[in-house]
Image: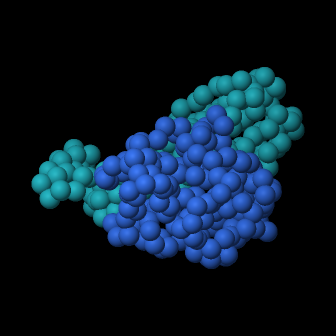
Chain colours: A cyan, B blue
Amino acid sequence: MEVGEFYRWEAEMSDGSVITKGGDLAGAIRVSIIPANGVPFPRHDFAGLRFERRFLKQFKHFTLNGPPDREANALDVDEKRGFSEEERKVRQEKRRKFWEQKGVELKVAPKPPNAAQCIETDDCRIWVIHLTGSVLITPKEYQLRL
Amino acid sequence: MVATVQIHEMTGTSTGVDKTSGTIRFKSSDNTTVDTNNRLQIPAAGDNYSYTKNLRAYMEAPPDTDIQDLEWYSDGSSGFGTGVAVSVKAVGTFTTNVDAQMTGGSDLFGYTSGSPLDGDGNNAGPFDSGDDDTYIGDIILMQMIVSSTATPKTLTPENWTLSYTET
């Protein structure tokens, strides 16, 4: 599942209909940001606000002059093998000592992608961060960059 | 449906290698391989230039409505150390990678979340389902510059971010 799919949205309009596509929220009486199946984050419901529009911001990262792929992929391989976080840390430390003795320094993998649903009202923006499920409320002109 | 946008290191006008969450490595050779070959040499005087890199966003799956406001930025702080810099600019078309000095670029670390590089000023959006499986936005041209004041070392990796608005 891509991080942009961690949450979906729906808006209930004043006539009772529910929309799930588009960006215009004029006339909506409720906007919900709902986690996808299996995503362990809370649902967020908003009502009693003058909604205007919504959109999704996505953030993709890569590194410049990072380590050769062998080192960057080691952590990813351990996760896919199903090692617990504790076991991954022990294995990471063992690899670090091994490569330190060999003369190569181990580096961490690149920053993971992220996304944020944005609901814009008449006086603020409400952001729901996909990687944490948390809510951030900012002034209407604020541009979130993660 | 949520769009899927990848970051590609271009190898031609309409072809590239997916580097999303991966690594771009500046080298003294024109290839996309992330290895320790073709390292940039520190000159006795003046500057040495890496081969340029062409980066571009690729729409792998379309959005429900459209994508716009492509922006690129760094964390604003270079960990590359003395004598190592990266120059960057947004252009409209692919140019063959060269190791001659790239003109018209600006310091990569001058582009931050508060002041990002406009990623669709030349190839403007919005981009919709008609752009599925194509490259969108501007090409980001980059080049590393190594000066005689640099010291031999393995560089600390730096992040470069693409953000966009989707409806």
B95 left or right, relative to A16:
left
Q: Is residue B1 left or right of residue A50?
A: left
Q: Nearer the viewer, residue A132 or B97?
A: B97
Q: Quadrant for residue A145, please give it.
A: top right
Task: For residue B83, say whether it is visible.
Answer: yes
Left or right side of B150 for A115: right
Residue A59 can be seen in this image: no
Q: Could you say where residue B32 lies in the image, as x and y percent from the top left?
A: 47, 71
Examine the rendered structure and indicate whether residue B160 appears above or below residue A144: below
Residue depicted at x 66% and y 37%: B115
Q: Is residue A31 left or right of residue A88?
A: right
Residue A53 in the image: state x and y as whole percent: 80, 38
Residue A60: x %, y % from top left: 56, 52
Q: Residue at x 52, y 39 (%)?
A: B75
- Residue A49 or A124: which is nearer the viewer? A124
Q: Residue at x 14, y 59 (%)?
A: A102
Residue B56 percent across, percent down from the top left: 63, 63
